[in-house]
Image (cartoon, rainbow, N blue to C red):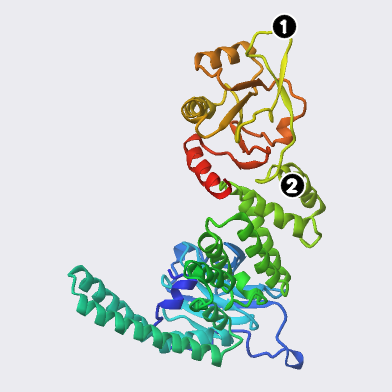
């Protein structure tokens, strides 16, 4: 079995086949136009009867592979026929046997094509008729296959040389490997020039590495690496034609976008990430389907992100494109759900000041309830913890928070306000006394001056916010073992 990307780098042997096998290619459409719909006629040699003539047509879309059609078997002609009245989306398709052997191919302008191949290795000796796109790519594979075999041999020799620490031999082999890659790049360049509209030409262009120049002499040495990173980030899609919808119907665009997300933008600030996505999305306005994918993907991804502060990314993009009326595919109910969720989450983004509220401190026995504001601390930092006795994670983390408070509360200038959501007052009081937690502020969450579940988005326990002296959120959902590192970094930046 060969995947589409394996076929880019593995030579396919080229035994000749008979070119005619009952294809519907001899009847031209009226006025010289392409016939309507699609028809893919497949002759599959050596296919076992035990697989009951099952043959499927799959397609790529974004990150997934989907079944598009099942073939009708013509026993008299020994042909498998996929047929439909409407043209399929142009892109990469997959021929899949009953036991999941498969091969990828191009379906583009020509959608009445023939394929001839052999089971079980469908890619070996595959042959196409009435499909100039696939025929051109097969010709490229045929003329370039010696590069692949040579590279395989040289890389094996280089591995052996490195294992024996023969540096001189390894250097010689690496030079030869570089030369073969350069020749292969030249072959790809020639393919692009000779077949500019072929989908593989688009793929070959997209595979080209982004050349990063040296930083200008005017850039200080300490900032040269950052300048080069910014250049690389801003030019990462230079060789991608985001107007070409065919890339959406291949694995290529998703893999590039995923690499951009997980490697290029990895651990950058939310502001850097959201603006990088916005620039990329704006480049795709020329194709509404690519535009859609490049909006939906980061909004979905950053909603699920566990990295602190990255919720600001999806909020920014969803407000601009979904609430801004540009998400043409979104139903009114989906837009309304985004609106409601953003109204709840946005006030709780890092840098914002949440709504103040008070709860009674009933750990001290007094005739009257002692209502205490969640903003009552005068310290530089306030750790607000919403917790529950029934929460297993809380039972492990609350003693850790208290140990940290006892050891470093004064040194790091932070207070803890712990709001218990349980309604069993006696059990709550017993727990905090048993764990000597009376030296920080304990509030009973049974009563409050506002619905903090809604306004502070307390959907699970523990929910944790760290506020600065102005009661703005500086981080959230942090574990106690990481507070010291955070405070040191924050103090270094702002104090």
What secondary structure is marked by label 1?
Answer: loop
Pointer 1 local density, CA inside 10 Å: few below 14, some 14–19, many at least 20:
few
Q: Which residue is mark 1?
A: 367
Q: Residue at 53% of width from left, 41% of height from top?
A: 487
Location of residue 422 in the rendering, given as x and y in whole percent from the top left corner = 64, 20
User: Looking at the image, which is closer to me, 339 or 119?
Assistant: 339
Numbered disc in front, either 1 or 2: 1
In the displayed structure, 116 sits above or below 388; it is below
Quadrant (top left, top right, bottom left, bottom right) of the N terminus: bottom left
Look at the image and tell me in which quarter the C terminus lies. Answer: top right
Residue 43 in sight in this render = no
Q: Is residue 283 visible?
A: yes
Whether residue 456 is situated above or below residue 365 in the rendered picture: below
* Residue that numbered label 2 is attached to: 342
How dense is the environment of label 2, judged by Cα within 10 Å: few (below 14), some, or many (20 and up)?
many
Q: Is residue 212 above or below residue 345?
A: below
Q: Residue at x 72, y 31 (%)?
A: 452
- The extreme top residue here reads 367
Tell me which corner region of the image, top left, top right, bottom left or bottom right, holds residue 459.
top right
Q: Are marks 1 and 2 in contact (CB under 8 Å)?
A: no
Q: Secondary structure at mark 2?
A: helix
Left/right placement of residue 454 relative to residue 365 reads right
**Left or right of 336 in this view: 40:** left
């Amino acid at each position: 079995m060969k995947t589409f990307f394996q076929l880019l780098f593995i030579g396919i042997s080229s035994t000749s086949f008979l070119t005619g096998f009952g294809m519907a290619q001899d009847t031209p459409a009226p006025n010289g136009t392409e016939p309507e719909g699609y028809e893919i006629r497949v002759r599959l040699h050596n296919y076992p009867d035990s697989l009951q003539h099952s043959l499927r047509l799959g397609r790529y879309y974004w990150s997934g592979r989907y079944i598009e059609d099942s073939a009708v078997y013509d026993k008299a002609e020994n042909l498998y026929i996929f047929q439909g009245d409407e043209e399929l989306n142009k892109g990469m398709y997959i021929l899949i046997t009953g036991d999941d052997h498969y091969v990828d191919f191009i379906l583009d302008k020509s959608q009445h094509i023939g394929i001839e191949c052999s089971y079980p290795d469908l890619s070996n000796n595959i042959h196409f008729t009435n499909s100039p796109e696939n025929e051109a790519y097969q010709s490229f594979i045929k003329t370039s296959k010696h590069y692949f075999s040579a590279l395989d041999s040289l890389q094996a020799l280089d591995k052996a040389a490195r294992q024996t620490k023969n540096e001189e031999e390894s250097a010689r082999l690496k030079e030869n490997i570089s030369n073969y890659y350069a020749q292969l790049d030249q072959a790809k360049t020639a393919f692009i020039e000779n077949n500019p509209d072929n989908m593989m030409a688009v793929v070959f262009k997209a595979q080209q590495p982004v050349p990063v120049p040296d930083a200008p002499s005017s850039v200080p040495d300490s900032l040269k690496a950052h300048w080069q990173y910014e250049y690389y980030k801003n030019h990462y899609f230079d060789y991608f034609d985001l107007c070409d919808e065919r890339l959406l119907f291949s694995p290529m665009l998703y893999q590039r976008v995923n690499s951009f997300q997980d490697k290029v933008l990895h651990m950058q600030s939310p502001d850097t990430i959201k603006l990088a996505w916005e620039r990329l999305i704006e480049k795709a306005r020329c194709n509404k389907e690519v535009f859609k994918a490049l909006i939906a993907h980061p909004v979905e991804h950053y909603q699920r992100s566990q990295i602190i502060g990255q919720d600001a990314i999806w909020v920014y993009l969803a407000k601009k494109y979904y609430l801004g009326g540009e998400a043409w595919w979104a139903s009114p109910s989906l837009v309304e759900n985004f609106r409601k969720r953003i109204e709840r989450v946005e006030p709780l983004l890092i840098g914002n000041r949440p709504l103040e509220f008070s709860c009674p401190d009933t750990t001290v026995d007094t005739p009257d309830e002692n209502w205490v504001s969640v903003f009552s601390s005068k310290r530089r930092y306030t750790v607000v913890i919403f917790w529950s006795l029934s929460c297993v994670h809380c039972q492990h983390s609350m003693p850790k928070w208290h140990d940290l408070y006892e050891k470093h509360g004064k040194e790091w200038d932070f207070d803890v306000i712990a709001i218990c959501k349980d309604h069993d007052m006696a059990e709550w009081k017993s727990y905090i006394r048993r764990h000597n937690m009376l030296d920080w502020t304990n509030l009973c969450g049974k009563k409050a001056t506002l619905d903090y579940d809604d306004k502070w988005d307390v959907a699970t326990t523990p929910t944790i916010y760290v506020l600065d002296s102005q009661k703005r959120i500086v981080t959230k959902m942090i574990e106690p073992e990481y507070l010291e590192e955070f405070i040191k970094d924050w103090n270094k930046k702002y104090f």
